[in-house]
Image: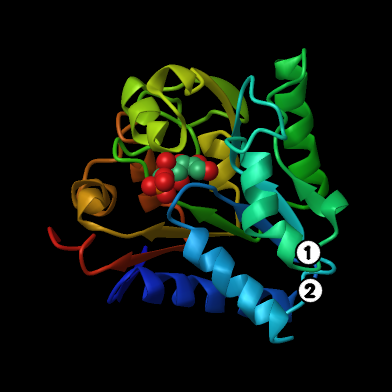
Amino acid sequence: MEIIKVKDYQEMSNEACSLIVENIKEKPKSVLGLATGSTPEGLYQQLIRKYQQKEVSFQQALTFNLDEYVGITIDDPNSYYYFMNEKLFNHIDIQKSNTYIPNGMVDNLDKECHDYEQLIRHAKYIDIQLLGLGLNGHIGFNEPGTSFSSRTHIVDLDESTRKANARFFDSLNEVPTKAITMGIDTIMESKKIVLLVSGEKKADAVTRLVNGAVSEEFPASILQKHNNVIVIADEAALKKM
Ligand code: F6R
């Protein structure tokens, strides 16, 4: 695991942006695994800037998002579908038909999980998977206790995760209780993983991710077993290391 220490959130975003732009320049048909949440927003702004400056084109790229809430329509501003369009896809030249996000509104969720796996397989797997880090060690929405051999599946969100995400909703009651997420094994199949972490409140989590025991009780610890992981973390997040 390589750890790149940066000064702050902006530098973290710039560093991640360079990695992705480099990858797309080398391989225009790159398959990118994307995340939502607060952590990658600065990176997405940087990618938009690079596109506007004509330094990169996403014409041929493919994307797979990690997760989506169950029971929230795509036109709801809290859906991850809406988030990705707003924060990235609407502002770059990616073909929308090449952007995949699990659909949490279908009747047959098990089939959706299965089909999502097939799509990733057909794309010949993810070149760079971006990850944020949950305070409880979740990656995607794989909460503590999730099997390391899990594939795309439906999860019950932890109370702590619902509370952490309540900031985006009018009240905690409105935060969904279920989500669809790539599994840990699905994430681990990615050729390269880039985990972004910023801020003091993630300091315990990132320390445990890097130095803690590999255990299903702390899902992100599995990344110690992947042979191509880059953690880009700012000084505040690395405070306890
Ligand atoms: C988002 C995701 C989550 C977040 C994590 C950190 O698609 O899969 O694992 O990356 O909850 O969220 P933020 O970045 O808001 O601290």
Camera-side residue of 93 and 34: 93
Tell me: 49 left or right of 134.
right
Q: Residues within 10 Å of mark 1 (few under 14, many from 20)?
A: some
Displayed quadrant of residue 53: bottom right
Task: Of the two numbered discs 1 and 2 on the same chain, state the one appearing first in sequence.
Answer: 2
Percent position (x, y) of residue 26? 71, 80
- How is the rendered protein coloured? rainbow
Quarter holding ligand 1: top left
Which residue was labeled with disc 1?
61
Residue under label 2, please give it. 28
Do labels 1 and 2 touch, CB within 8 Å?
yes
Residue at the spot x=62%, y=78% of the render? Answer: 49
User: In this picture, is 78 found above or below 14?
Assistant: above
Q: Residue furthest front?
A: 170
The amino acid sitting under disc 1 is Ala
Q: Circle 1 — which element? A: loop
The C terminus: image quadrant: bottom left
Residue in the image at 62% along x and 57% along y: 87
Label number found at residue 47: none
Q: Which quadrant is home to the N terminus?
A: bottom left
Image quadrant where residue 18 sits: bottom right
Query: In which quadrant of the rendered view does residue 72 lie?
Result: top right
Q: Is residue 197 left or right of residue 20?
A: left
Q: Residue furthest left?
A: 240
Q: Is residue 220 above or below residue 108?
A: below
Which is nearer the eye, 150 or 30? 30
Picture coordinates of residue 86, whole percent (x, y): 66, 53
Q: Is residue 209 left or right of residue 188?
A: left
